[in-house]
Amino acid sequence: MDLTYRPRRLRRSPAIRSMVREHSLNAADFIYPLFVHDGKDVQAISAMPGANRWSMDALIGEVERAWALGVRCVVLFPKVDEALKTEDGAECFNERGLIPRAIKAVKKEFPEMTVMTDVALDPYSSDGHDGIVSSSGIVLNDETIEFLCRQAVVQAQAGADLIGPSDMMDGRVGAIRESLDEEGFEHVGIISYTAKYSSAYYGPFRVALDSAPRADSQKPIPKDKSTYQMDPANAREAITEAQLDEQEGADILMVKPGLAYMDIIYRLRQESELPIAAYNVSGEYAMVKAAAERGWIDEKSVVLETLLSFKRAGADLILTYHACDAAHWLSKG
Ligand code: PBG
C-alpha cells in the first residue's frame, strides 16, 4: 500500500513508544485515603479489600509505608464512635477529636508528608448527612457552613496542609478561606470537591465510616444527598461550580467520582488553569478488587491503565486507594 502516514512506526519498540508517550504516572501524583478509628485493632473493610480502619499506631505504620513508596500526600477520614455522633455533628470541631489527633501524630513522625483532610459533617452526624438537617428534613446550607469553618480551622491548627471541603454546601470555599485567613492559616490550601456528584459509587466508603444517611422516626431525613451533591445528568453545572470555587479561593479543583466522570475532568481542564484532582472512589476500587479476586481481570494492568487514563483526561492528582500498590508497581514493576 502507498501510505504516507503509518502511525505504527512510532509503536515499533518500547524505546520509541516511551519517547512519544504523552502521559505518565508518578507516585507523587497520588493522594492516599486512610481511615482511622479510636480502637487498638486494625479492622478490615469488607467491600474494600486492602483498605482498613487503622488504629492510631497502625496509621503511622501505613503512612511510613506510603512515604517509602514515594507517596507524598495522605487524606484522613474518621470512623467516629456512635456515642459521639449528634444531629449537628459538633464533634467535627473537637480539638481533641480523632482527626486532629491523627493529623498531629502523622505530622510529628512525617513532617514532610502533605496531610489533607475532609471537611463535612457526615462522619459525625447522627443523621448521616454532610450538613445539619432541619426538623422538616432540609439540609441547611448557611448554618452548616459555620460548623465547616470551625472544623477547617481545627484541622489547620492540628497541622493540616490541605483542607478538602467535600460537603457541597454553597459558598463554603469562600467562607473557609476567610476563616483560615482570620486565624493566621493563609498558607493552608483548599482542595475543593468542586464537582461532586450524588453517586452510588460511594457505597463502600459509607460502610467503612458507617456514615450513610439514616432513617429517623423523629424527623424526615433525606435518603440520599441529591439536594446538595450534583445530578449525574449535568455537565455544564460542573463548570459553574468550578468558576465559583475559583472565585472563592480554591487552590485545587476536584472531580468525584472519577471513572464515570472523565468528561468532567476533561472539561474542567479546559476551563481552569488550576490543578485538577480526580477521586478514584471506593466503588471504583471495589469493582476492580472484586473482578481481580475472581481472576477475571489482571489487577496491576487494570489499575495502572485506569490511573493513567485520569492523567490523560486532564487530572494532575489522583486520590486513590490503590496508591501504595500503584507506587510499588511503578517503582519495582
Ligand atoms: C464525605 C465523603 C464521601 C466520600 C469522601 N468524602 C462520602 C459521601 O459524600 O457520601 C466518598 C469517597 C469514596 O467513596 O471513596 N462527605
Image: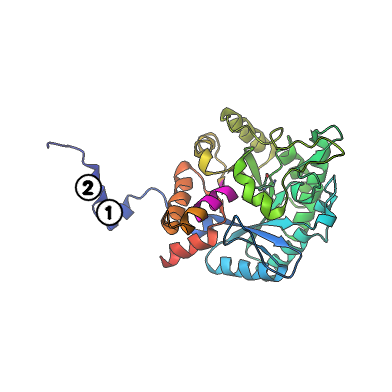
What are the residue bounds of the magenta stretch? 278-289
Residue 319 spot, x, y in % from top left: 57, 52
Residue 125 spot, x, y in % from top left: 80, 47
Q: Amino acid at mark 1?
A: Ile
Above or below: residue 49 compared with residue 310: below
Q: Residue furthest left?
A: 1
Which residue is tagged 1? Answer: 16
Residues at marks 1 and 2 touching, judged by CB atoms closer than 8 Å:
yes
* Predominant SS along the magenta part: helix
Residue 155 spot, x, y in % from top left: 76, 55
**Side of 74 relative to 181 (left or right):** left
Q: Amino acid at mark 2?
A: Arg
Nearest the eye: 147 or 269: 147
Q: Is residue 281 at all visible to an observer of this figure? A: no
**Quadrant of the rendered structure where residue 105 is?**
bottom right
Residue 66 spot, x, y in % from top left: 57, 65
Residue 9's tag is: 2
Above or below: residue 213 compared with residue 205: above
